[in-house]
Amino acid sequence: MTDPLTAIAERLHATPQTSRATDALCDQVVVPALREAIVGNLLPPGHRLTEIGLSQRLKVSRTPLREAFAQLEREGLVTVVPRVGVFVREVSLRDVEEIYEVRAALESLAVELATKRMTAIGHAQLDALVDTMHGRVAAGDPEGYTEALDGFYAAVMSLADNSALYQTHTGLLGPVRRLRRIAMSLPGRMQASHDQAVRIKEAMQRGDPAGPQLMREQLDNACQAAKTVLEQHA
């Protein structure tokens, strides 16, 4: 049976844009593969990441791995302990609160801007994304729902059409997706998230200024769900 991390890396290696240059391997294969594995809990909190083992599993040299560790540390996904090793970072209640505070500021602004700049294409795009989310809820598929929700938030950021906002939010994507997976494991959270996403979408489409507040409510509820899951497993 193929190792899941190796399977992720093989998929990334196979993409047409992948280069064999060290910097490109770090950005196009190693960082995305490790980020996906951490977010999906294939590499759980506290897990030690070793250069030798990962270089074999990801089919890369150790140089792009060292660069990837530095990037993932900046994203808050790993902890580098000098002369000891690299570890998948534990998620604390403080982490959850801080990240959701920043998300509330960024994503409520994105909703405000996207509402003002809504187009017919954007309207249809949001409808399609919410339909996909509904299908994942109906199928009882939290992982698929989380991926669809990622797409919904990405569309809102794109429709906001503000490059500085987009770049700032992109820097949070690793921790955000990790916390989103944690929150979605709470019973009932997937349905509640979907229902609120529908309200946000409809507010944006009709030009309702309540949209940013609806987004803040969504994030407040997601923050509480993530904290509840962490407390249950403490």
Image (cartoon, rainbow, N blue to C red):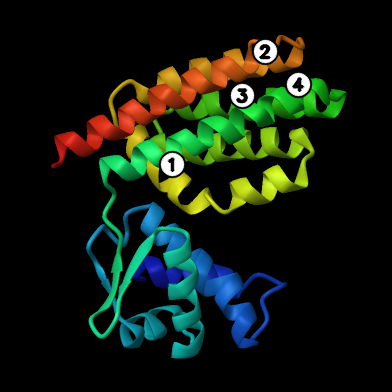
Tell me how far mark 4 sits from mark 2, CA to CA.
Answer: 10 Å
Where in the figure is residue 177, as x and y percent of width and height? 46, 45
User: Going from the N terminus, do you reach mark 3 or mark 1 first?
Assistant: 1
Q: Which of marks 4 and 3 is in front?
A: 4
Between tags 3 and 1, which lies in front? 1
Tell me the SS state at disc 1: helix
Q: How far apart are marks 3 and 1 (CA)?
A: 28 Å
Which one is nearer the viewer's eye here, 132 or 18?
A: 18
Task: Give yes or no for contact between labels 1 and 2 (Cβ–Cβ under 8 Å).
Answer: no
Q: How crowded is mark 1: few (under 14 residues within 10 Å), some or many (20 or more)?
A: some
Disc 3 target residue: 131
**According to the image, label 2 marks what residue?**
202
- Helix, strand or loop at mark 3: helix
Give the residue at x 52% y 41%. 147
Q: Which of marks 4 and 3 is nearer the N terminus?
A: 4
Q: Residue at the location (70% across, 11% down)?
A: 209
Query: Which residue is nearer to you in this view: 65 or 151?
Result: 65
Q: In this view, does 153 lie to the left or right of 186?
A: right
Q: Which of marks 2 and 3 is nearer the N terminus?
A: 3
Q: Is residue 208 above or below residue 171?
A: above
Q: Name the residue under label 4.
A: 115
Name which of mark 4 and mark 2 comes first in the sequence. Answer: 4
The answer to whether residue 129 is left or right of residue 146 is right
Question: Alpha-carbon neighbours of circle 3 within 10 Å: few (<14), some, or many (≥20)?
Answer: some
Query: Mark 3: which amino acid?
Result: Asp
Contact between labelled residues 2 and 4, with CB atoms less than 8 Å apart: no
Q: If you read the primary sequence from the N terminus, does the residue marked by circle 4 or circle 1 appear first?
A: 1
Q: Name the residue under label 1.
A: 99
Tell me: 170 left or right of 124. left
Amino acid type, label 2: Glu
Q: Can residue 165 be seen in this view?
A: yes
Q: What element carries label 2?
A: helix
